[in-house]
Amino acid sequence: MALLTFRGGVHPDDGKDLAKDKAIVELKPNGELVYPLSQHIGAPASPIVKTGDQVTRGQKLAEAGGFVSAPIYSSVSGTVKKIEPRMTPTGSAVNSVIVENDGVYTETEYEPVKAFDQLSKEEILKLISDAGVVGMGGAGFPTHVKLSPKEPDKIEYVIANCAECEPYITADYRRMLENPDELISGMKVILKLFDNARGIFGVEDNKPDCIERLEELTKDEPRMEVMKLKTKYPQGAERQLIYATTGRAINSSMLPADAGCVVDNVETIIAIHNAVMNGKPSLERVVTVSGDGVKEPSNFKVLFGTNQRELVEAAGGLAGEPKKVISGGPMMGFSMLSLDTPITKTSSSILCLTKDEVAEYESGPCINCGRCVDVCPSRLLPTWIAKYAERLEEEMFVKHEGMECVECGACSYVCPAKLQLKQSIGSMRKIVLANRKKQ
Amino acid sequence: MSDNFNISSSPHIRARVTTDKIMLIVFIALLPATFFGIYNFRDQNAWIVVVVTVAASVATEYIYEKLMKKKVTIRDFSAALTGLLLALNLPANAPWWMCVLGSVFAILIVKQLFGGLGQNFMNPALAARCFLLISFTGRMTNFVYDGVSGATPLAQMKAGEAVNTMDMLLGYTAGTIGETSVIAIMIGAIILILAGAIDILIPGTYIASFVIFIILFSGHGLDAQYITAQLCGGGLMLGAWFMATDYVTSPITKTGQLIYGICLGVLTGLFRLFGASAEGVSYAIIFGNLLVPLIEKVTLPKPFGKGGEK
């Protein structure tokens, strides 16, 4: 069978060999843990503890601030030290609950879970919502909202995003190799919500071992299928993944559910498994620490709230003099001023690079070469809309479909004039969205 | 506490290709044709035309940018490339002042006055050639080969004379410095394609539509010898592979490039068969350049997922 894919895209050096063969190591945090109250899309969570409170591991620190929101739990036992704004990986200060770890890890007594067969759909959704599960691939959209479309019967595909198309990151790869049962169990949970859906695991063909393992484990699951995807960035972007696996195309005004699809990434599906099968809140995730600026690239299972510096130290510390430290992947991640930010629900990776390729190149004039047009997965004219963006020509920007941009960064990556196309377009998109809200 | 790492918007990695590298690749790809031309017209010291034109183009860019207190951009190789392309489009016996005049016209008028690299709406080298062709028609079309003044193969064909296609393929004919050897040009074209500098789409549709046009309208029908001679003669190969593919003056979308290639093929056929001159590539491409904004306007791509529900 031909490999499934989409039109456009780029092939950056994937750097995955650095951490690919490093088994997941559990990391216990030292010192304080920082829980930003907004680590998801939607309303911030509202704190229900106060300074001085004793908390146990798994105790709720903050309640969901609405339907599109998610609660936040303590991943350690200890004392609430403070509630104050702290710097997050994206560079903004967010109100956070700070817990001093007592190192005992006294667990909360969770409510016993009902057998899976006896759970109703509503109960499943409530378990997921109560556990604070959000999209852990980077967007942080509350999962229970995604799993509650208007017409659940019309969902035909539940797609597990196993593409992991960002260079360097190997967290999902290790999860698929080491915890495939949890992934498949999580898929079973989601499929129970959608009677007419099939489950698809979309895996890039640079992970043949994962494909083989998942195929083996799902061979007796009539509703599940593993699909091989071409290795190409951004294969794991939601719209591109849906197109590759189902042939359906959605645009910016549609949700995956409009095309009968629900997409969740590996780590999120495992969190769903934990929430429903074990009745446990979302407390931890796997994070890749990699790049040439770190001594021993590794994959760690870490508790939310852990200081990122602790992960780098556990990975042998910084090597050389890293110019750039990124939370997430090199294509869409956030560069961080400092390592002193917490691991949140959406932290998939810490990447330390000794070379800052952005700073090394000087940008020049556009020569109309069309490379950005060729690679744009949304089939736009990036150089044109970036020009409209720079001139703040909102009308032309929208007319030339600037709002369809998914900000994958393929245009900036490939530009020979080293223009910051994605940055210009992304900024203009924010302005347009803000103006629309005003009206 | 702050580690002061660099901050910038994503993506944090970049492809290795740069504007300078692309220009350099095209420059290198032109060298086979350049060296063949210098050898072919050694009796007329063609090397002087090449050196003077390249030097004058680079100097014009440097002086203009210095005078205007702009950043000097001669290191991006684009001025040198324009100079080389212009030289290859000149007869070997062109006087030095014509080389300089053409260079100044290309760099100053066509490129810099419109805003520099990326802003010109015509290919500077070709615009300069056409400027010289109109201003000094006699000198620009007085081709000397092997010590005798003679017609180019295309002119001979237009007059109904027989031509030697093997000589045209190899390049042992009269013509401008860089246009005569199809083999040398094709070596360059292969370099361009292998290096990823150009797509085959524009030259492919250009040449194909030109062939269809002459089959239909030349009166020679499917005469393979005539078609081959038309393909190998004049500036078609140099124009199709090196000038029609100029990024700045060709459409940005693939559909646009397809239409552009067809326009060039038809225009070249039209000028060659029905025009006063036997040659038509330069004018066809210049004219095609003017159509680019229009072509781009009608070939705006449809965004992914548009036209679906909602």
Image (tube, coloured by chain):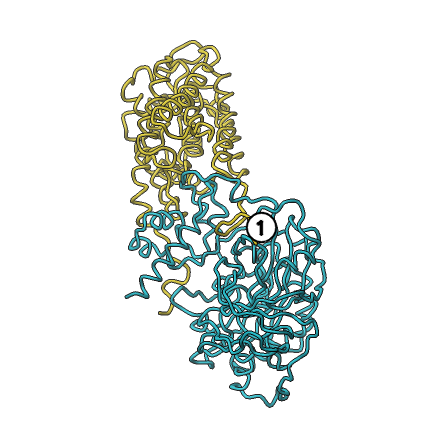
Point out residue A421 in the picture as x, y percentages from the top left corner.
43, 48
| A393 or A65: nearer the viewer | A65
Which quarter of the image is occupied by the N terminus of chain A?
bottom right
| B76 or B35: nearer the viewer | B76
Quarter holding residue B103: top left
Q: Residue at x 51, y 25 (%)?
A: B31
Up the image or down, A12 lies above or below A134; here it is above
Relative horizontal placement of residue A141, taking residue A402 as reference (left or right): right
Point out residue A313 in the picture as x, y percentages from the top left corner.
68, 56
Residue sitting farthest toward the bottom: A118
Quarter holding residue A51: bottom right
Up the image or down, B261 lies above or below A26; here it is above
Which quarter of the image is occupied by the C terminus of chain A?
bottom left
Chain yellow in the figure, letter: B
For the question of whether residue B282 can be seen, the reply is yes
Q: Which residue is mark 1?
A: B3
- Label 1 lies in what chain? B
Point out residue B39 in the picture as x, y percentages from the top left corner.
51, 16
Relative horizontal placement of residue B246, taking residue A291 as reference (left or right): left
Give the colour of chain A.
cyan
Q: Badge 1: few (under 14), some or many (20 or more) residues near its Cα, within 10 Å? A: some
| A386 or A131: nearer the viewer | A131
Relative horizontal placement of residue A131, taking residue A408 as reference (left or right): right
